[in-house]
């Protein structure tokens, strides 16, 4: 590929397809995540990165080599790898005496760091520690957030948005009932965040609706919130801005109630009820000729039946 005046022009069809895939679109590609470890890591952090990579596959890239960087002090290396792999999410693992067993979840906007949240691992169970059948690779999970902190505290609100972005998977129009088998549950309680992974089992219930049971499959984390790097409100609003072509057009004279029922309003001209078509009955017919004149004058009387 050659570059002329800041514009990259492809020389082959393969390069053209590559640039078209990276170009801005109305509906963006699936968000990829890059998972990497720092210069110093522990066995807990290394195994945790592998387990989260197993949950995120195939929309993730796992770096096996160590990357000597500190995201909160210098994020240029993260932005470089993000542009190289076209990833807008990242997970960085490190370990030191001051902050042991450290995980940093983050996301980028326009290949620049938008926000980062640092979580410390206090208790951990890996996928291999929990002996049970696992969900297939690429299964779209159901995300459940429990705790008042996710609705009231600013740091936990951003953490909820970040975890939703990281684990939600591809956007699909519909999912079959049997495909709802993976559940990720996050609980905020007493300053800690508990992450659990379950597999939903559909059991016979004697009726049409199956009975659902949850079986823990791992990994299991007990996190504690540490440092945060949050974007300003203006930048956060800009990152969530949607193009006009994707915004739904407002339809006139259509409204919905609290239950989602659709109501429509029709505008009609004033009707002349004298010309309204009704059911034709013999008794309502207009009489014509001398019979009608006799009825008006009272000369005729209704028919009677003689009774002996």
Image (spheres, helix red, strand yellow):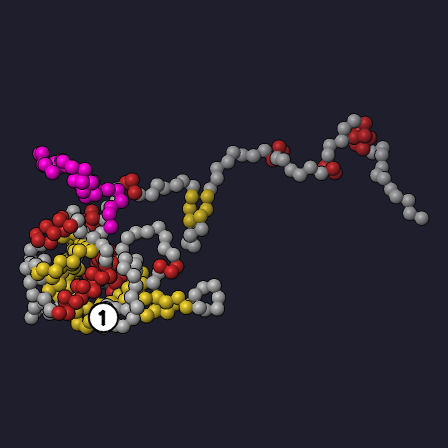
Q: Residues within 10 Å of mark 1 (few under 14, many from 20)?
A: few
Whether the magenta-drawn stretch holds residue 9 is answered as yes
Residue at figure coordinates x 24%, y 50% from the top left: 30
What range of the chain is rendered magenta?
A: 1-30
Outermost residue toward the top in this view: 289
Outermost residue toward the right in this view: 308
Q: State the image quarter where residue 19 is shown.
A: top left
Does residue 226 appear to the left or right of 220 in the view shown?
Answer: left
Camera-nearest residue between 273 and 153: 153
Q: Secondary structure at mark 1?
A: loop
Q: State the image quarter where residue 253 is shown.
A: top left
Q: Is residue 188 visible?
A: no
Camera-nearest residue between 164 and 300: 164
How many callouts does the rendering have? 1
Q: Is residue 290 visible?
A: yes
Residue 138 x, y percent position in the rendering: 27, 57
Q: State the image quarter where residue 292 is shown.
A: top right
Camera-nearest residue between 233 and 49: 49
Residue at figure coordinates x 27%, y 59% from the top left: 137
Residue 32 x, y percent position in the rendering: 20, 53
Does residue 9 appear to the left or right of 217 in the view shown?
Answer: left
Residue at figure coordinates x 46%, y 42% from the top left: 265
The N terminus lies in quadrant: top left
* Residue identified by numbered label 1: 128
Q: Is residue 271 above or below residue 145?
A: above
Does residue 255 appear to the left or right of 281 in the view shown?
Answer: left
Residue 41 x, y percent position in the rendering: 9, 66
Residue at figure coordinates x 41%, y 54% from the top left: 258
Whether the magenta-drawn stretch holds residue 103 is answered as no
Residue 158 x, y percent position in the rendering: 21, 58
């Amino acid at each position: 590929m050659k570059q002329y005046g800041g514009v990259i022009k492809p020389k082959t069809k393969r390069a053209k397809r590559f640039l078209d895939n990276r170009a801005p679109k109305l509906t963006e590609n699936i968000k990829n995540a890059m998972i990497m470890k720092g210069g110093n890591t522990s066995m807990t952090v290394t195994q945790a990165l592998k387990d989260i990579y197993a949950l995120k596959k195939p929309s993730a890239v796992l770096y096996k080599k160590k990357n000597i960087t500190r995201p909160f002090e210098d994020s240029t290396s993260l932005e470089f790898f993000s542009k190289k792999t076209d990833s807008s999410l990242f997970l960085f693992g490190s370990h030191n005496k001051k902050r042991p067993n450290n995980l940093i979840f983050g996301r980028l906007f326009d290949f620049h760091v938008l926000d980062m949240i640092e979580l410390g691992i206090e208790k951990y169970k890996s996928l291999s520690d929990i002996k049970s059948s696992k969900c297939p690779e690429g299964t779209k999970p159901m995300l459940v957030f429990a705790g008042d902190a996710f609705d009231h505290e600013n740091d936990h609100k951003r953490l909820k948005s970040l975890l939703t972005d990281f684990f939600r998977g591809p956007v699909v129009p519909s999912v079959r009932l049997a495909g709802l088998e993976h559940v990720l549950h996050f609980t905020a309680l007493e300053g800690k965040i508990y992450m659990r992974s379950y597999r939903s089992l559909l059991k016979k219930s004697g009726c049409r609706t199956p009975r659902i049971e949850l079986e823990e499959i791992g990994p299991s984390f007990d996190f504690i919130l540490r440092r945060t790097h949050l974007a300003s409100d203006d930048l956060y609003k800009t990152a969530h801005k949607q193009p006009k072509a994707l915004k739904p057009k407002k339809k006139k004279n259509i409204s919905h109630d609290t239950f989602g029922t659709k109501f429509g309003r029709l505008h009609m001209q004033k009707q002349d009820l004298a010309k309204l078509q009704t059911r034709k009955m013999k008794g309502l017919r207009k009489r014509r000729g001398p019979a009608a004149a006799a009825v008006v004058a009272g000369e005729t009387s209704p028919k009677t039946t003689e009774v002996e």
